[in-house]
Amino acid sequence: MAEPPATPRWVKVFGIILLALTLLVSLILLTGRGRHGPERHMSPAGSSGSFVVAGTFGNSAGSALSGVVARIPAEVQAQS
Amino acid sequence: MTMPALRRLVLTAHITASVGWFGAAAGFLVLLIAGMTSDDTQLVHAVYLAAEPITWYALVPLILAALLTGVAQSLITPWGLIRHYWVLFKLLLTVVAAVVLLQYTRTVSHFAAVAAETSGGDAGALQGYVLHAAVGLLVLLVTTVLSVYKPRGLTPYGLNRQEAQRRAQDRQHSG
């Protein structure tokens, strides 16, 4: 019975590159820059349910709130 | 509708969706770079706002259309979906790109919502946008090269099918 043809070299090269990129992205996501998505740009602000978006949007006039936007869910606002 | 006519129709839809995706991604990237490199806070603000409809009404529909028409095209042609390595790699790359884009819509919608509530803007998060859009374009370029060159190579499944077809033909000739 004839031997099956070997896997083409381009497939091996392509596979290795894809595998390396997958590992790299997984490593980045699992380590220091682990958080992905909008929450990556937020930091906890103490009380439960509230969070702060830091360094994202500011007031163009350069007020004290420039660069920091406090976002508090409606149910927390209603309690306070 | 005859099979060749159906194949041509699905191929036309696939090329249209893919070219549309490429154009939308390229235009999006140019817009993002303009926002990222600008000191004009109004422009940055506008980029965050514009990013959401471009993502939801151009990029997402086009990538899903490209994926669906690509799968349909492969299933109604002799190429198959997992018979040839180049088709398999195209499928994998497109699925990964679609999943990453759908994940990233959360970020885009979040910043668009924040932009809608505020005036001005900080281009900080646009770096992430640019990175994702640039990688998306690179994926599209690779899938285009694979489609045009169609490099040889059958998967183990494709080899088995080819062998089974050969045996069936031999039986027909001898019988």
Image (cartoon, rainbow, N blue to C red):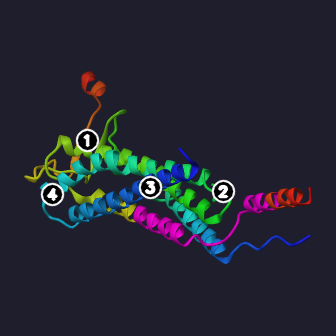
Farthest residue to the bottom: give it.
A9
Q: Which residue is mark 1?
A: B113
Badge 4 density bin: few <14, some 14–19, many ≥20, Cα 10 Å: some
- The subunit carrying tag 3 is B
In the image, taking residue B33 as reference, residue A10 lies left or right, namely right
Cα–Cα gap, marks 3 and 2: 21 Å
Looking at the figure, which quarter contains the C terminus of chain B?
bottom right
- The subunit carrying tag 2 is B
Q: Are marks 1 and 4 on the same chain?
A: yes
Q: Is residue B128 above or below residue B146?
A: above
Residue A48 is situated, as x and y percent measured from the top left of the image, at: 37, 33
Q: Which residue is mark 2?
A: B82
- Callout 3 amino acid: Thr
Residue B66 is situated, as x and y percent measured from the top left of the image, at: 46, 52
Q: Are marks 2 and 4 on the same chain?
A: yes
Residue displayed at 26% across by 45% down: B112
- The subunit carrying tag 1 is B
Q: Secondary structure at mark 3?
A: helix
Residue B82 is situated, as x and y percent measured from the top left of the image, at: 66, 56
Q: Could you tell which of marks 3 and 4 lies nearer the N-terminus? A: 3
Q: Determine contact: label 1, label 2, CB under 8 Å.
A: no
